[in-house]
Amino acid sequence: MGSLTHDHSGERGSSSFNLKPYFPAIISFIMLLIGIVIDYSGSFTWFEGWLRLGWYSLAYIPVGLPVVKQGLKLILKGDVFTEFFLMSIATIGAFILGEYPEGVAVMLFYAVGELFQSAAVKKAKSNITALLDLQSRTASVLRDGDYQTVHPETVLVGEKIQVRVGEKIPLDSVLLSEKAVLNTAAITGESKPDTVKQAEKVYAGSINLDAVIQLEVVREYKDSSIARILNMVQHATTRKSKTELFIRKFARIYTPVVTFLAIGLTFLPYFFVEDYNFQQWFYRALIFLVISCPCALVISIPLGYFGGLGAASANGLLFKGASFLDKITKVNTLVLDKTGTITKGVFKIKEIQTTSMTEDELMRYVLAIEEQSTHPIAKALLEYKTKEAIYEATGVSEIAGKGLKGQVNGKEVLLGNRALMESYSISLPEATKAIVETVVFAAVENNFAGYIVVADELKDNIKEGIRDIRKAGIKEVVMLSGDKQAITTRVGEELGLEGAIGGLMPEDKLRHVEDIKKDSSRVVAFIGDGINDAPVLAVSDIGIAMGDLGSDVAIETADVILQNGQPAKIAKAMTIGRSTRNIVWQNIGLAFGIKLIVLILGAGGLATMWEAVFADVGVALLAILNAVRLQKMYIG
């Protein structure tokens, strides 16, 4: 259907039903009903001639005038063959033939269908525009020793803010308080509360559930996660799928073709039919015009994609366009990065072994040195809590690519990898060679003192996620990593992947994906999270970035964003994509099928304007209801 204007601006943010846009249709309906009752009662002989024409004309004006005006406006712009033109010609033609009730009825049902279409589009878009409400309009920022309420746009990076229980976090920040319990459903699509610890990131749009928390701002308002989501999803609605683009081009050709066919249906029978009656064939041509209006196709298809994009965003999946919603249904090969994608990207102490001292004493030496390091492994080690205060270290220095050296309690302490120990001729247990994870060796006064195994953990439910991905239709899952081959192989075997290749530089990952794509039968999706993954995301058929840990470069390059950082969501994305595609094609089949049947009946004189109304407005409404069903399936 077209863009016949009915102002809904006053309805935004209100859940109450606004009857005002329906007033013209209600007036026309009441007048039409009264006219039909008078017509068929047979008791009102005075209701004829100019009086009858005037009554039905008044009934026509509230719904017909906006359509006729819009049609004329578009004609003046050079856009002749529109649904406004078709409806205007068909209904005015019905008046010329004296079929006043049918003329009013066609335009009335068209106007009602237009209103329902507007409501359906608004409903489909609401899952996207509702994100606007997630942007906080105020922030409590610490200035001059006191918390002041300001607009988040005025808050600078590095300033400290406070968020009370039940309030939304206004800007992307780092938690200064010991812990926070947050509702992150707006960002991740997950309803389960998320517990965040001190120094961890929190995102704008999350809701504080537990206690008053203090935060330090790390991104400006315009760059916050929720602003980025809004920008991506709003742009997604402007990126059409191939089906949408085809239907729009088709409608531009289809409408003038059916107009000329209607002209032919009016005049050509004169040369072939003995008892040719102009009025009869003109009436059939008008029916033909009403039936052939491409409303159902033009609105129901984009509406289906609106529903799909909204359903995806409600589930923490951000598609940058309807075309990617289509493409993800064809993916059969999934390539994943390891660190931050399959694993948490956070190192944890897995094992501690000592020789001549207790575990607690060894860790007091280790932590004294590691306190002065910013390496990710140092962060993991510093989470260890000793029973007594750690020692004090002096003269700590880094030995490039090997580890750290320093003085602790007057003793020289070495912490690092196997190469560091070998460079100081410190012998290590033979058994340590079999350890595939990262090992931090410790030596005190050139004597081996023990080692700590540090490992990156698999993400929660990743095994179940891989199973769901396979059930969704992915035939091959391959992992590429810059980590050691031994670690990559172990993770690949644990997850049952078809391939696990380690020791790769960014250009190696790119080359591997390009090699996979040489097989034309493969449609490749790549999931990554770091800056170094951006080239691979760009070259893949579908690039998917991790929204929780992902770098800005990866997120900008990707076609789809997983807001909760769980690869298992790909299965949900594929399911939503398939449901969207099915509904779109159901609508295409419904529109073409019913219209074709009634077109043939109308051309043969077996269908009246009432059947034409059903074939046009009725089919459009059925298609709209079918499209809205998508939201019920995945949002409720």
Image (cartoon, rainbow, N blue to C red):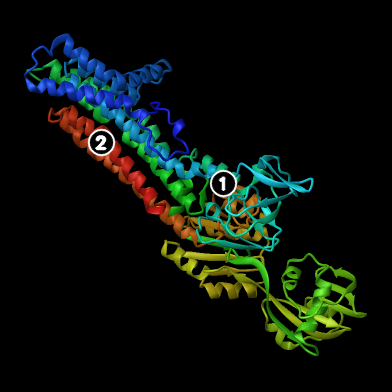
Is the N terminus in the top left, top right, bottom left or bottom right quadrant?
top left
Identify which residue, 44 or 93, lies in the foreground: 44
Locate residue 27, reporting x and y percent. 27, 23
The residue that mark 2 highlights is 618
The amino acid type of the residue labelled 2 equals: Gly
Q: Residues under labels 2 and 1: Cα distance?
A: 36 Å
Side of 492 where 53 appears, left or right: left
**Farthest front residue in view:** 146
Question: From what the image shows, is residue 368 above or below residue 300?
Answer: below
Please name the residue shown 63% across and 74% down the image.
487
Asked whether, in this view, residue 402 is left or right of residue 151, the answer is: right
Q: Which residue is mark 1?
A: 229
Foreground residue among 126 and 47: 47
Q: Is residue 626 left or right of residue 197?
A: left
User: As shown in the figure, which amino acid type bears the numbered disc 1?
Assistant: Ile
Against 620, residue 413 (above or below) is below
Q: Position of residue 52 (x, y in %)?
A: 17, 14
Secondary structure under the numbered disc 1 in the rendered image: helix
Crowding at label 2, few (<14), some or many (≥20) Cα neighbours within 10 Å?
some
In the rendered structure, are the residues bearing label 2 and label 1 in contact, judged by CB atoms less than 8 Å apart?
A: no
Other-residue count near label 1 (Cα within 10 Å), few / some / many at <14 / 14–19 / ≥20: many
